[in-house]
Image (cartoon, helix red, strand yellow):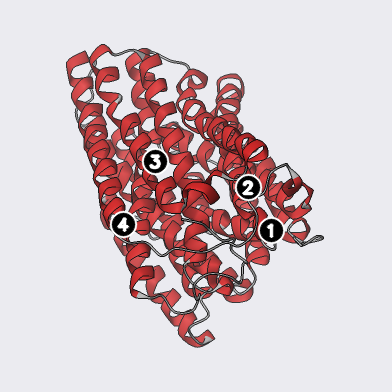
Amino acid sequence: MASISVNSTSGTSQGAPSGGQLQAQISLFSLFFMWGFITCLNDILIPYLRGVFTLTIFQATLVQFAFFGAYFLGALFYFLFSVRFGDPINRIGYKNGIIIGLVVAGAGCFLFYPAAIFLQYGLFLGALFCLGLGLTMLQIAANPYVALLGRPESASSRLNLAQGFNSFGTTIAPVIGGFFIFQYFVTDASAGEVAVKIPYVVLAGLFWLLAVVIFFIKLPKFANEDVIEKGAKVLGFSHLRGGIFAIFAYVGAEVAIGSLLINFMGLENITGLEEGAASKLLSFYWGGAMIGRFMGAIMMSDKSTAGKKLAGMFALGVAGYAIVSLIAGVNFMDSLPYLIGLAMNYVIFMIFGAHPNKVLAAFSLSAIVLLLIAVFMNGAISMWVLLFIGLFNSIMWSNIFTLAIKDLGRYTSQGSSLLVMAVLGGAVVPPIQGLLADEFGIQMSFLLPVVCYIYLFYYGWKGYEVKQKAT
């Protein structure tokens, strides 16, 4: 099966989804949900493993280093292979690429079983590395494929919708993961085994089951009459280079904040919450990304009038807030401050929603302000403003991704691998913030993500501009 680039004019029609496209979208949305769920479990693993192995914050954040480091190495190998031999996805097809990723990710999940039995921190890190390799292949294959399944003009909308399902996984993961891990958490090793074996073995089975399902279903094929590109000419596109740094900054900031939020909420000058209670509130951070992505999918869709879009976004935002509050087990009156962040999010969508770059810049600026409030104030307000940031992280991945691969033509898959490689930010930024937290305190360490969002503001303001198109 051959593939086409997002902007190719060859291949099947990219109008309304056909039956095959709809089936493919449902399968892919399930996939996005699963890897969102499993990625967010890392935020639960960090305080859990820190307690089991008596780790420093820096050592505990090596969880993210192993997981996202695998993204970098996997994508780097993919890119180097494509430079020498041509784009692998163009050779094996999107479907086979997705299946390979699912099988490897399932193997990584299953490796948690022996890691939990032997209770060796290195084995946990190895399992996370294998899991990250599988998810790397999924990211490289699935993100461009979602963009292909419809009109090019609505590619951002489809990616936001897919990422919305990804965020639904991250929203419920803190509650489910927190139940299995902190509910059973004691210093007894056997209880620790039960805590992490159950969710990861189940996830291994789900990944492998989805691989079988996708193997047997018929996915749309996209023809590509272009030659399979070799070399590194794709690096000549400045908007792609800027997008690589933007993905690095976005993933680094998002993961770093999520990794230390439970510890942050446990500070006496913030709320002093225990880990189990804090893990539930983490749903507001990741749930905000879900709400924002679904709202972004509506706003950037080309199928409704402006009035209908705004009404739909308002209804979805309120419903999303109610759902997240229920998932977190928080009384609506106690979670009312979250509506402030939701209102800010909605207003920005109203003003800039049709322009992905402007929304990216405005959301980045909002995140900067919220982080500064969290760092220099105390009490519940510092907790809530950090939880707000999930709302503003929401559309960043899909908007950066579509801005960065715009007009790459036959270089799109290569560009996609480079963007996935930039997920390295999730491996680099959290440990650095962990070092800062050990040295200067958890609260002050949140100044590091501010630097990331400053660059994201620049990319949305100026760096996204296309100065060269593929010929």
Mark 2 residue crowding within 10 angstroms, few (<14) / some (14–19) / many (20+): many
36 left or right, relative to 216: right
Residue type at the position of mark 2: Gln
Give the mark nearest the N terminus, 1 or 3.
3
User: Is residue 342 among the parts visible in the rendering?
Assistant: no
Q: Name the residue under label 3.
A: 100
Give the mark nearest the N terminus, 4 or 3.
3
Query: Could you tell me residue 256's position as x and y percent?
Result: 53, 36
In three-dimensional space, the C-alpha distance between marks 4 and 1, rounded to whole angstroms, equals 42 Å
Give the mark nearest the N terminus, 3 or 2.
3
Q: What residue is shown at x 44% (from left), y 79% (from top)?
A: 16
The one nearer the camera, 410 or 452, is 410
Q: How many marks?
A: 4
Residue 179: quarter of image: top left
In three-dimensional space, the C-alpha distance between marks 3 and 2, rounded to whole angstroms, equals 18 Å
Q: Is mark 1 on a helix, strand or loop?
A: loop
Mark 4–mark 1 CB contact (< 8 Å) = no
User: Is residue 147 among the parts visible in the rendering?
Assistant: yes
Query: Could you tell me residue 94's position as x and y percent?
Result: 46, 53
Q: Which of marks 4 and 2 is in front?
A: 2
Query: Could you tell me residue 51's position as x and y percent?
Result: 34, 19
In three-dimensional space, the C-alpha distance between marks 1 and 3, rounded to whole angstroms, equals 25 Å
Q: Mark 1 points at which residue?
A: 408
Mark 2–mark 1 CB contact (< 8 Å) = yes
In three-dimensional space, the C-alpha distance between marks 4 and 3, rounded to whole angstroms, equals 37 Å
Q: Name the residue under label 4.
A: 325
